[in-house]
Image (tube, grey):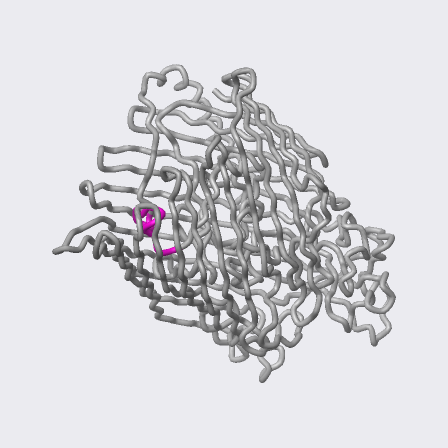
Amino acid sequence: MNTVNGVSRLSLLSLALAAAFSAQANNDTHIEKIEVVAERQAYRGDFIHLEAPEAMFELDAELIENMGINSLTQVLDMSASVSRQNSLGGLWDSFAIRGFFGDENVPSGYLVNGFNAGRGFSGPRDVSGIERVEVLKGPKAALFGRGEPGGAINLITKKPMFQTFGDVKLTLGNRQHQRLEADFNTTLSENTAARIIGFYQQEDSFRDTIETEKQGITTALVFEQSDRSKWQYELEYAEQEIPFDRGIIAPQGNFDFMPIERFLGEPGDGPTTTMVHGHQLQWQYNIDAQWQLSSALAFRQTELDSLSSDADISPSRQKLYIDFKTLTRQHRQRAYDTEQYVARFELAGDITVGDFKHNLIMGVDYDRFDFDRDYRVARAPALSTNPSDAQLYAINIHNPVYGQYSPPTPTPVIIRQQNQWATGVYIQDQITVTDAVQVRIGGRFDWLKQTIDNKISQQYAEQSEQHFSPQLGVVYRLADEWSLYTTYGEGYRLNFGTDYQGAAFDPNQSESIEFGSKWTLLDSQLDITLAYFDSQQTNIIVADIQNPGFSAAIGEASSQGVELDVIGQLPADVTVNFSYMYLDAQVDKDSIDTGLGVSLKKGDDLLNIPENSASLQLSQQYTLFNRPLSAGFGVQYIDKRLGQRGSEFYLPSYVTFNAFAQYNVNDNWIVSGKIQNAFDREHFTNSYSQMWVQPGEPRKVLLSMSYQF
C-alpha cells in the first residue's frame, strides 16, 4: 500500500466524519442515549465471573487513562501474569503469559475483539482506541485456535454509541513529550452511529539521540438494521517511526558499567518505520432471546522497514570482551510485510434438555497469514584475523563518535515467503448440572497448512497438520458469592522456519491444568480470583545438535504458579486493581539455544521470567469546590530475572511507583497530572544477553488538559 496515498485517504475520511459530527451535533440531541451494559462476545459466550472455569484479569480504559500510559506493553505491566520479553530494540510488543512465550523472533500475537488479528509488524500497539484489555490465562486453543502458549490477550475496542459527544486532549511532559488525542462520537441517523479516535505523539527519549513519532486513527460505524440485526465496521491505521535501540551493556552483571542514557547504535541509520492498516466487519443477529448468530470478516496489513547497528554478541568477534571499551557492531537490514485474512461464523445460546441447561457456542473460522521476510546482516571478521576498528564497525562505548566508520553492506540471510492457513471448527458446552455444579466440555479441530519458500536456498516446503484441542472445566458454587473451579486446556502455535531437511517444524504445543477459587463481594462490586496452575510447553525451537547450523523443534519447558487477582470497588469510593503471581518456570529438557549457542540444562530458569511479581493500583474519588477530583497511585514489583540463557547473568529486582490526580474544572474542562516512576528508580525491564539490556524509563511527568463536549 502506498503510505502517502493511504494517509491522504484517511485524512479525507477523518475530515468527512468530523464534518458529519459537527453537522449532527446540534440536530441529534433529541435522540435517546443508549448505554451498552453487556454484549455476548464471540468465542466467549455469556458467563459471569463465578461461572467461568478460568482466570481472567481486566484492565479498563479509565484505569489506563488514570495511569497516563498509552502503549499495550505498559498496560500489560499491570498484570503480574504477564512479563516483558525481547522486543527487538523496541520495535514490537513481546510478552510471556504465565512464563511461556512463543517465537521470540516475531511479535507476540493478540486478539482484537476476539479476532486472531493482532499478528504482524505494526510496532508497539497504542491503546487510544481500546475500551479494555483482557488477560485470558491458560491455553485457549479449544476456542481461538493457534495463539500464545501461556494464554491470550484480547483487546476490546471502543464502540460507537447513540449520543453525540467529543473529547480533545493535549498532554505535555518532560523530554519534549507532546501528545494530542481526539475522540468524536455522533449519531448519523436513528439507527446509525459513528466514532473516530485519532492520536499524534512525538517525544525525545532519555536515551541519547533517540526520538519517536507515531500517529493513527481508529474509525467505527454501527448500523442497527432492526431490533435483531446489527452491523459493525472498524478501521485501524497507524504509522510509527522508532529508532532501533538494543539498550546498554552490563558485562558480568555490572549495571553501572555505562550510563543508561548512552546509545550504542548509529543515528545515521534513521528510524525504523512501521505501518498497520486493518478492517473488521461484524454482523450479529438475535434469533430470539436465547440464541445469536455472529459472523465477521477481517483484513490486516503490516509493514516494517529497518536499518540497525547493534552489538555483536559473538565472543569470536566482540572486541569489548578484550579491552572493555571497543564495541564490535553488526549492521542489519529488515523489510517485513504481512497480510492476514480472517473469517468467522458462530452460533451461541442456551437450551434446556431434560434437567440440564446447556450454554452452547458452536462455530467455524478461517485464518490466512502471509509473511514476506527479507533479513540481511553484515558482521565483522573474527578477532583472530586482527581486524581494524573500521572492519569491526566499532564504537567506543565510553566516548561514542557516531558516523566514524561507513556501515558495511548487509548481505541476505533470510529471504523467505511463508504462508499459513488454518480452518477450524469448535464447540463448547457449559452444562448446568445442578444449582451448584456446572461442567464445561468442548474442543476444536483445525486443518492447518503452511508453505515456506526459501528464496536463498531455493527450497520449498509444504506442511499440513490436523490438530485437535480439547478443554474440560468444572465449577462448583459453594455460595452465591463463592465458587471453586478446575480446568484443563491445550494450546498451540505454528513455528516459523525449517529444519535441516527443509521441512517445516512441528507446532509449538502447551497444556495446563488449573485449580482456582473465585469470590464476588460487596454487592458484586469486587471480584477476587485465586488460582494454581501447572503447565508444560513442548516443541520449542532449539539448536539441532546432530546437524550444526540448523534448528529443531524439540525443546521443552514447564511453569507452575499461584496467582491472586483483585479487581473492583472498595468502600469510600476506592477502586482497586491488584495482581500477584508466584511462578516457577524452567527448562525441562537439555538442549542448545539457537541464538547464543549455549547449553540449556534441565532446571534452568526461563529468560526474563520473575519468580515473584506484583502490581497494585488504587484510586479514590473526592469532591473539591463541589467538583469531582480523583487521585491515586500504582506500584509494581518485579523480582530478579535471568537475563541471558546459559549463564548466571540476572537482571536485578525493582519497584516503581506512579501517581496521578484529575480534577473536573467545570462540565467541559478537565486537568490532570501523572508521575511515572515517581522516585526515579533505575531499573531494567528485560534483556536478551548482557550485551542487550533494556533500561526502564526514569521519572516522567505528564500534564494534560482535555475539553469534553
In the rendered image, residue 579, in percent from the top left (x then y), is placed at: 52, 49
Residue 49 colored in magenta in the image: yes
Which residue is depicted at the point 64% across and 66% down? 412
In the rendered image, residue 127, in percent from the top left (x then y), is placed at: 52, 40
Q: Main secondary structure of the magenta part?
A: loop
Of residues 241 and 287, the one drawn nearer to the viewer in this rendering = 287
Of residues 668 and 210, the one drawn nearer to the viewer in this rendering = 668
Which residue is depicted at the point 51% across and 66% down? 559
Which residue is depicted at the point 39% across and 44% down? 280
* Magenta segment boundaries in residue numbering: 42-54
Camera sees residue 275: no
Which residue is depicted at the point 63% across and 44% down? 241
Of residues 351 and 233, the one drawn nearer to the viewer in this rendering = 351
Residue 264 colored in magenta in the image: no
Q: Quadrant of residue 324?
A: bottom right
Q: Quadrant of residue 500?
A: bottom right
In the rendered image, residue 389, in percent from the top left (x then y), is placed at: 85, 63
